[in-house]
Amino acid sequence: EVQLVESGGGLVQPGGSLRLSCAASGFTFSSYWMHWVRQAPGKGLVWVSRINSDGSSTSYADSVKGRFTISRDNAKNTLYLQMNSLRAEDTAVYYCARASTAIRSRPFDYWGQGTLVTVSS
Amino acid sequence: DIQMTQSPSSLSASVGDRVTITCRASQSLSSYLNWYQQKPGKAPNLLIYVASSLQSGVPSRFSGSGSGTDFTLTISSLQPEDFASYYCQQSYSTPWTFGQGTKVEIK
């Protein structure tokens, strides 16, 4: 069974840092692109970042570029999101999601349960 | 960036109704369009990929159509468990973008 379990969320002050983790199981983690998607309270889904299967290529939404860093440890089957210089507008539930390799549109076929990040003084 | 516009933003419908949600892209996506369902407090769930293919395990009352810039999600006969929010998403180019969502509520 495919499972994605996020952790690391919490309350942080503006300007602070946080590292999110996403532990993967039930599939060959090293074969899949992975994404982070966030959702502010009561709002819609917003794509944040993506990493390819071996970690050699990444991309970011403009809103987080230069502040967030996506990475992965394929030996530990874990995806990370390092978030620095956090702002109030970064407050959201953060989901990790797997991108299908079997479908050319690469939809997000599995999602974690999400972890809440609250940026407030 | 490709902008995705869904309509309506919300709708009220009864069990058994046929429901249609539309999604328009600011540029052609070919068929690189996916649909997700999200229930309150839960993660999104993939329903439809490449515009019209049904994800495994998703009931056949859900269907998708369209290509280019205009796409549609249809629920042929609304069931109680379908009351949720629905999002389209383009995976044609980075950054991946979502529509603003459509909330389907009970009439």
Image: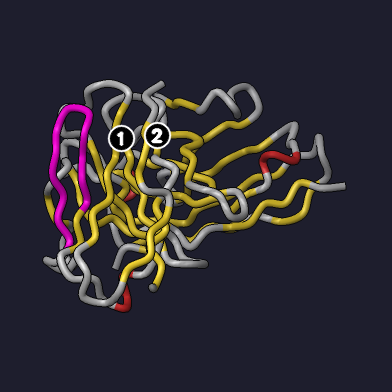
In the rendered structure, find residue B97 and report the number of the disc placed on it: 2
Question: What crowding class fits label 2: few (fewer than 14 Cα within 10 Å), some (14-19), or many (20 or more)?
Answer: many
Q: Is residue B46 visible?
A: yes
Q: Amino acid at mark 2?
A: Thr
Q: Nearer the viewer, residue B41 or A70?
A: B41
Q: Nearer the viewer, residue B97 or A109?
A: B97
The chain to which mark 2 is attached is: B
- Answer with the quarter of the image where residue B61 lies: bottom left
Q: From which residue to which does the magenta span run?
A: B62-73
Residue B71 magenta-highlighted: yes
**Quadrant of the drawing holding the C terminus of chain B:** bottom left
Question: Where in the figure is residue A47, as x and y percent of width and height?
Answer: 46, 38
Tag 1's secondary structure?
A: strand
**Quadrant of the drawing holding the N terminus of chain B:** top left
Q: Nearer the viewer, residue B22 or B36?
A: B22
Compared with B23, B103 (above or below) is below
Tell me which residue sits at (29%, 40%) in the image.
B23
Q: Which residue is mark 1?
A: B90
In the rendered view, does B10 fall on the left or right side of B76?
right
The chain to which mark 1 is attached is: B
Question: What crowding class fits label 1: few (fewer than 14 Cα within 10 Å), some (14-19), or many (20 or more)?
Answer: many
Tag 2's secondary structure?
A: strand
